[in-house]
Amino acid sequence: MQILDGIAPLADRYDGYVLDLWGVVHDGKRPYPGVPEALGALKRAGKRVVFLTNAPRRSWFIAGMLDRMGLDRALYDGIISSGELAWRMLKARRHPWFARLGPRAVHIGPERDLSVVEDGVAELVADPAAADFLLNTGPDPERGSEDASAYLPALEAAARHQLPMLCVNPDRHVMVGAERLICAGALADLYKPLCGDIFEVGKPDPAVYDPVLELLGIDDRRRVVAIGDTPHTDLAGAQAAGLDALWALTGLAQHALGDSPTAETLRQVALREGVDPIAALRALRW
């Protein structure tokens, strides 16, 4: 597998760039070195850039986070988050899984994720017996972000009432700084043997790429590349949506494979994951 040092060699090949955030653009605290400069070079070249993230918060909230990290909004053209898509689906209730949900949800997750139910798309209740579904946005400060088993009592309480789970982040783990933390997907894995009625919103579902392509305004998918650090979400999702994928060797990839994985190591991992990225990328830089 070819390993690229930066994205400049791809500039003539693609018009649209779909970028994961955590692990590609930033480490959960600040942009990676070279990222603002790379995005600036893409924009000067007339490219379109949209961020696609499995974060369980609405897009406006993610934009505010990037503002606080110092990432200029002129460097990208839009954000689609799993939280934004879940909010839209809860509001519309057109998808068959959502159409059968009642309005009341018991929530597992931090308060910062509650933009996903704003404007009355769901009513939060404390007692699973009074709920119609379980809203899972991931770990909260009380039970922590390291051990999914700390959430088992709450999951078992929801399962006793056979509450369907809306999982608003299919990621199992994420890197925040140097720490590998659990995400909502890890709680969904625990819930599955208790109650298998789970709907996950986000990558690798190919449907999440349709609103991204609308934001990009590019009809020809051959002119769009997706960049992510996780094979089973970022790369698999792009592949299922008919997009080329570039494997960023930062974030979870760096944690799993180290600083200098060989091309053969990357090829073997990609084969195991059933993905076929066009190349690997040492970091999102020009």
Image (tube, helix red, strand yellow):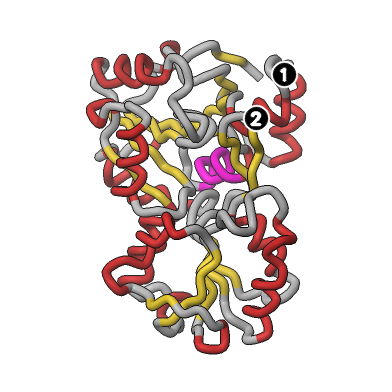
Q: Secondary structure at mark 1?
A: loop
- Label annotation for residue 276: none
The percent coordinates of residue 157 (x first, y second) are: 66, 79
What quarter of the picture does the N terminus occupy?
Answer: top right
Q: Is there a contact, CB below 8 Å, between mark 1 and mark 2? A: yes
Q: Amino acid at mark 1?
A: Pro
Q: From where the camera sits, is residue 176 visible?
A: yes
Q: From where the camera sits, is residue 12 visible?
A: no
Q: Is residue 59 magenta?
A: no
Q: CA distance from mark 1 to mark 2?
A: 9 Å
- Label annotation for residue 253: 2
The percent coordinates of residue 246 (x first, y second) are: 53, 28
Say left or right for 78 vs 109.
left
In the depicted structure, whether residue 162 falls above or below residue 230: below
- Label annotation for residue 261: 1
Residue at left 36%, top 56%? Answer: 84
Say left or right for 258 vs 106.
right
